[in-house]
Image (cartoon, grey):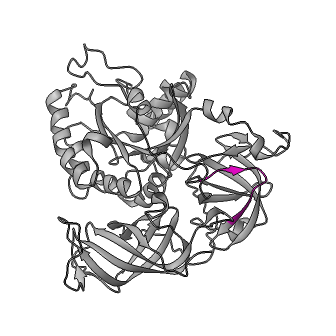
Amino acid sequence: MGMTDEVDTKSQPVQAEPKSFFIPFSLPSLKDKEVADMDCAEVPDEMESQKKRHLNVVFIGHVDAGKSTTGGQILFLSGQVDDRTIQKYEKEAKDKSRESWYMAYIMDTNEEERVKGKTVEVGRAQFETETTRFTILDAPGHKSYVPNMISGASQADIGVLVISARKGEFETGYERGGQTREHVQLAKTLGVSKLLVVVNKMDDHTVNWSKERYDEIESKIVPFLRSSGYNVKKDVQFLPISGLVGTNMKTRVDKNICPWWNGPCLFEALDSVEVPVRDPKGSYRMPIIDKFKDMGTVVMGKVESGSICEGDSLLVMPNKAPVKVLAVYCDEDKVRRAGPGENLRVRLSGIEEEDISSGFVLSSVVKPIPTVTEFTAQLQILELLENAIFTAGYKAVLHIHSVVEECEIVELLQQIDPKTKKPMKKKVLFVKNGAVVVCRIQVNSLICVEKFSDFPQLGRFTLRTEGKTIAVGKVTDLPSRSSA
């Protein structure tokens, strides 16, 4: 089975690729912001309680739906980018006869992206509202870049699904082969439990803030969201916007423009999203998505559980390498400690950068993350390649948190009846599209995973073959000898 879309991830450490998933930035040196050395336990918790909550937002949707433009507009409206920069981008976009792309330039940071008008890496940027600090992860929408979209979504707490209302564009993104469907399924599997569906380009001359067009799009998307596992009443909110001109984003849309809309604007909707609470006192887990050298070894990732403090002793799994935390950076700032949900850069001693691969996990010494070469999982088959049969011996590429690893299905254990959710009696030898099946999956080298019931963020995954997501699943059981 060809693995054309995937990086080859055998057991050797991943060499630092020229394309990082992140906007590179240098760390301030340790001397810059030295803090009096005090024990973590003494850091008062009042500071913690006054801090705004932190959420990661991923923008997903088809290639031209306007994700980067909307992200750029948010940064402009929240004061992260000044007028002069915008004017510079506007001129640059005009010079390349791409006038409507100037807002996207804020999110698309490299030349290749600007020339093509496509986001390839997962761009990152911060902004704040009344109650929340947000990190925007602007995931690429083009088909060949789906693996990058996975790395963005696997870090996200909430998703903003951007849909173009322009005649023809919504249809292209939504039909089979369009990215809207695949992204929604991936987002759900990767743990994006809340979704804001923003119907963009409402100012387009083919739409003119038409209620009929908005309602038509909503009526087509809702059944699909339901089938992807979203509770539409509880977890999904629809709203109309224009990302290019910023309408209904920071302030509610003027009734003269859109008399029928009585709901919130985008900032209000983002502010009011409730997300599940992670455990700051749990075992420490931070999947590593990138690493580099800067006065020591620095790893980057999002804390999924537990807290970290300068001076902590931790393990890098699956290698069980003992490390010491020299410094913790949250956004640009050096901090004494950080809890779950934060995107961090952590400077470590005791390990070389080349001994770390993407997919390793920074873990507490007590109750470290289990490491396995095989696990049992419940899979939902989405769409196999033509003429493919899903059976023992099927090979695919496993994406679980920041792990990308070739895998093989070694045994189908039972098929689940989608209606009753109970196992079917008959022995299962192969399954087709739409089936739910429990199976054993094997990988070539040790990987870090958790049971979905213990740590949802580290126990759900996607299987991909030849550039297509063919199944989504969750880890239901680990072999008894797995573990540190």
Residue 348: x and y, percent?
75, 58
Q: Residue at x 52, y 67 (%)?
A: 403
Residue 125 spot, x, y in % from top left = 55, 39
Which quarter of the image is occupied by the N terminus? bottom left
**Where is 468 relative to 22, above or below?**
below
Q: Number of numbered discs present?
A: 0
| Residue 308 is a magenta residue | yes
Relative side of 138 to 160, left or right: right
Residue 52 horizontal side relative to residue 28, left or right: left
Q: Residue 304: percent from the left, percent from the top?
A: 55, 54
Query: In the rendering, at what x and y percent does residue 464 appear?
Result: 37, 69
Name the residue: 34% across, 24% down. Answer: 248
The part of the image, by quadrant, that contains residue 260 is: top left
| Up-down relation of residue 311 to residue 129 (above or below) | below
> In this picture, which residue range is highlighted in magenta?
306-315
Towards the viewer: 88 or 403 = 403
Q: Is residue 69 above or below residue 311?
A: above
Does the rendering let one see residue 192? yes
Q: Say whether residue 243 is magenta.
A: no
Specify whether 222 is left or right of 335. Answer: left
Q: Residue furthest top?
A: 256
Indicate the quadrant containing the C terminus: top left, top right, bottom left or bottom right: bottom right
Which one is nearer the viewer's eye here, 228 or 206? 228
User: Could you say which is closer to the camera, residue 455 or residue 121?
Assistant: 455
Residue visible at 21% across and 68% down?
434
Q: In this view of the protein, can residue 3 be seen by the observer? A: no
